[in-house]
Structures are given as structure tokens and as C-alpha cells.
């Protein structure tokens, strides 16, 4: 039985994989050194938030709005939302 996979896990792996050199095995390093990996991610997030916080929040807000709209559209169905 395979472990549960988050819906966007593949996208996150692709993003990290593209940002790092191809031969760099970041997944092994995170499994081997989880505490330093979390600290590095926290510091990186803090720096990113301090320097690009407004842009990041805007992108997250737009992403969240799109996801909510897609889910509402899926739940209500195209027949209800389609213009006549």
C-alpha cells in the first residue's frame, strides 16, 4: 500500500527539482537531516516574507480564490452556473 500523497506534492517536487541542480538529491538530505532542513526552510520563508511578502500574499490570495471558485463550480455544477 502506498502512502497518501497530497494533491500538490508533485508540483512542489517539480518546483524544488527545477530550482536545484539535477544531481542534487534534496529528498535524501531532508530525510537524513530533518531538523536542519526545517530550520533552513523557516529562515528561507522568513527572508522571502520580509523581502517579497506583499507579492507572495497576493499570489496566495489569487490561488486561494481560484481554488474556491473551482470547488464551488464543481459542487454546484455547470448547469446551475451556466448562463442561459
Image (cartoon, helix red, strand yellow):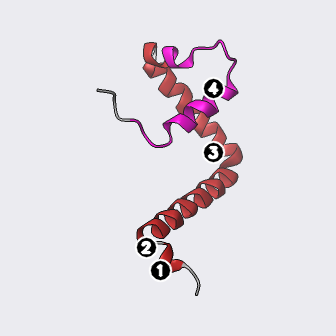
Q: Mark 3 or mark 2, which is nearer the start of the sequence?
A: 3
User: Alpha carbon of mark 1 to alpha carbon of mark 4: how far?
Assistant: 41 Å
Q: Measured along the vertical axis of the image, is residue 83 above or below residue 42?
A: below
In this orientation, which residue lies closer to the viewer: 54 or 68?
Answer: 68
What residue is drawn where x is 51% and y is 14%?
29
Q: Which residue is mark 2?
A: 76
Front-most of residues 78 and 3: 78
Residue at x 70%, y 47% (from the top left corner): 52
Q: Judging from the image, what secondary structure is the residue with disc 2 in?
A: helix
Q: Quadrant of residue 26?
A: top right
**Which of the labelled discs sits on residue 80, or is there none?**
1
Mark 1, other Cα within 10 Å: few <14 / some 14–19 / many ≥20: few
As drawn, the label of residue 17 is 4
Alpha carbon separation for disc pair 2 and 4? 37 Å
For discs 3 and 1, the disc positioned in front in the rendered view:
1
Q: Mark 2 touching mark 3, by CB under 8 A?
A: no
Sequence-wise first label, 2 or 4: 4
> Cα distance, mark 2 to mark 3?
36 Å
Please identify, in this view, whether the residue under mark 3 or under mark 4 is nearer the observer.
4
Q: Are marks 1 and 2 in contact (CB under 8 Å)?
A: yes
Counting from the top left corner in percent of width and height, residue 34 is at 44, 20
- Vertically, is 37 above or below 67? above
Q: Which residues are magenta?
A: 5-29
Residue 10 counted in the magenta span? yes
Q: Position of residue 51 (x, y in %)?
A: 71, 44
Image quarter where the N terminus lies is top left
Task: Tell me if 77 is positioned left or right of 11 in this view.
Answer: left
Instruction: Tell me the residue that label 3 is attached to.
Output: 49
50 displayed left or right of 11: right
SS state under label 1: helix
The mark lying in front, picked from 2 and 4, is 2
Amino acid at each position: 500500500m502506498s502512502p497518501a500523497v497530497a494533491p500538490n506534492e508533485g508540483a512542489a517536487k517539480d518546483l524544488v527539482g527545477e530550482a536545484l541542480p539535477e544531481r542534487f538529491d534534496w529528498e535524501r538530505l531532508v530525510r537524513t537531516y530533518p531538523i536542519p532542513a526545517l530550520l533552513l526552510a523557516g529562515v528561507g520563508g522568513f527572508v522571502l516574507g520580509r523581502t517579497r511578502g506583499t507579492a507572495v500574499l497576493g499570489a496566495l490570495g489569487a490561488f486561494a480564490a481560484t481554488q474556491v471558485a473551482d470547488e464551488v463550480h464543481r459542487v454546484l455544477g455547470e448547469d446551475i452556473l451556466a448562463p442561459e
